Amino acid sequence: MKKRMNHFVEAAYLGEHSSVFLFVSILFMMGVIFGAVVVNSMSFEQKEDLFYYLSQFFSQIANGETAASGELFVQSLLHNSKFIALMWVLGISIIGLPIILILLFIKGMVVGFTVGFLVSQMGWKGFVFAFVSILPQNVIIIPVFIAMAAVSIVFSLKMVGRQFTKKLSQPILPIFGRYFLLLIGAIVLLALASGIEAYLSPGFMKAVAGK
């Protein structure tokens, strides 16, 4: 019964704030598109410089000279957790709403730029490399980022509403508690994504780079 009630509450929450989730999803996709467009606006010299470093990276992968999987896991988890934690804190700060949107747009832009650059410089092989190196972990990371951005925006709007309407009848502690649990759940999912990035993706990348 309790499980059904939780599912009902989650569905009601998503329904109530579906416009926010849709908006942040569109914003992320706009970032991806913008990142891909930026690749085309780069000069030939800039592309050559980036491709040189990319070629060096491919050589390291093919020769097995990359960092240890444990180190990669920690680096990935810390990087993504910091990003998520910043969004979470901005949701509490009330005035952080526009910064949350900017962070999500930047995340989308980085993904779009990376994929766009690989494809533009390496064609089909670049697409395959992007598929095996970026997609596996981002199947988890991207939904987590979008969900955290949306919930942080909703939480920020609620804090603003409490300040301006002075509706303090609803206790803030239960709301904050759920918001904190969301952060913990997001970090757990990011740990799973980091495990994929550290222990599975390098093998895929080596197979592609060695061809």
Image (cartoon, grey):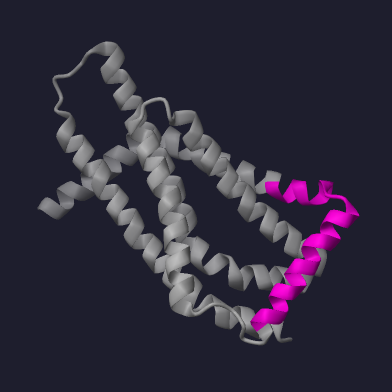
Q: As drawn, is 122 to the left or to the right of 82? A: right
The location of residue 58, given as percent across then percent down, is: 71, 77
Q: In which quarter of the image is residue 204?
A: bottom right
The location of residue 163, given as percent across then percent down, is: 28, 16
- Is 187 drawn above or below residue 193 in the view shown? above
Counting the numbered discs, the total is 0
Camera-side residue of 92 and 120? 92
Of all residues, the one furthest to the left in this rendering is: 1
Asked if the stretch drawn in magenta spans residue 49, the answer is: yes
Of all residues, the one furthest to the right in this rendering is: 44
The location of residue 168, given as percent across then percent down, is: 17, 19
Q: Is residue 26 visible?
A: no
Q: Is the magenta stretch mostly helix, strand or loop?
A: helix
Q: Quadrant of residue 173?
A: top left
Query: Magenta segment, which residues?
Result: 35-61
Give me the residue at 72% from left, 80% from top. 59
Camera-side residue of 172 and 61? 61
The location of residue 101, given as percent across then percent down, is: 51, 36
